Amino acid sequence: RSYLDQIQTITLPGENGGLTVGAGELGENADVGDGVAIHPENVKDVIRTLRRPAEYQYTALVTQSYHSLENQTQVTAAVKGERCRLRITPADGGQEKNIILTPDSYYAWLSSSSPQYYQGSRGEYSYDEAGGIPTYEDVLELEILEAGYTERDGKACIYVKAARPVDNAMGAGLMVEDTYYIAVSTGLLYGAESQVGGLTAYSMQQTAYQADSPAETEFVLPNGQTVQTGA
């Protein structure tokens, strides 16, 4: 038996005493977190080593705000190997958008457009980006101000705080303050928030997660064709 098989708890070091969690709670990333203190200088390297499951499903709530206006969408993702199915459902009752991604292709359709759909090249579009969720690349390109371990909704997370200029003329001179929470157990973004001038402009919160293999029906196009890897 390996060392990690024998221990019952793992301590994730931190400036405020760190977190002690059950070894089984960290999944495939138990060896990444064990004994490694997180700080701004090494957090990008640690994030790069996190492993995601090959198959999983999750639901997240994405909220975008501008002054008194607010737009909410529910994003449901089903990942199976190199295929991902996304359902993006507006909270205001608008049409649900469906997306299937393979390594090479991008398929999209609205729930009301059956049996028509769009097919194109995926390019460098990531699963997260397609659902309006920050990507690993977004986090890794930031200038990190704070980083460490924290507990969020009972889950051990790596948190990252950063600041960047607002990327449009209307916000010239303002800074965006970003906070990201990455679940150690799955390597997935668990929560995120962006504030401008003390107001929340964007937030994302994972509301459900399953380590189950999605059914093949998740990858069926409106015309009844099943999308295969490499299609």
Image: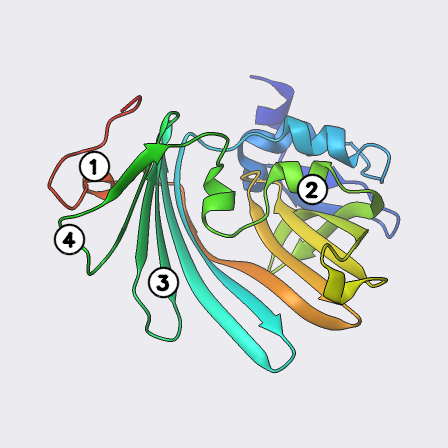
Q: In front of the other: label 4 or label 2?
A: 4
Viewer-nearest residue: 23 or 108: 108
Residue 65 position (above or below residue 219): below
Residue 124 position (above or below residue 14): above
Quadrant in the picture for the N terminus:
top right
The colour scheme applied to this rendered structure is rainbow
Give the residue number, with chain letter if any, for mark 1: 216
In the rendered image, residue 113, in percent from the top left (x then y), is placed at 19, 56
In the rendered image, residue 226, in percent from the top left (x then y), is placed at 17, 34
Give the residue number, with chain letter if any, for mark 4: 114
In the rendered image, residue 34, in percent from the top left (x then y), is placed at 71, 31
Marks 3 and 4 sit apart, C-alpha to C-alpha, by: 16 Å
Tag 4 near tag 1, CB within 8 Å: no
Q: Residues within 10 Å of mark 1 (few under 14, many from 20)?
A: few
> What residue is drawn where x is 85% and y is 40%?
40
Residue 139 circle label = 2
Q: As drawn, which residue projects farthest toward the top?
A: 1
Marks 4 and 1 sit apart, C-alpha to C-alpha, by: 19 Å
Q: In front of the other: label 2 or label 1?
A: 2
Tag 2 near tag 3, CB within 8 Å: no
Q: Give the amino acid type for the residue marked by disc 4 in the picture.
A: Ser
Give the residue number, with chain letter if any, for mark 3: 89
User: Could one spot residue 231 in this view of the protein?
Assistant: yes
Q: Residues within 10 Å of mark 3 (few under 14, many from 20)?
A: some
Q: Give the amino acid type for the residue marked by disc 2 in the picture.
A: Val
Question: In terms of secondary structure, where does tag 4 sit?
Answer: loop
Quadrant in the picture for the C terminus:
top left
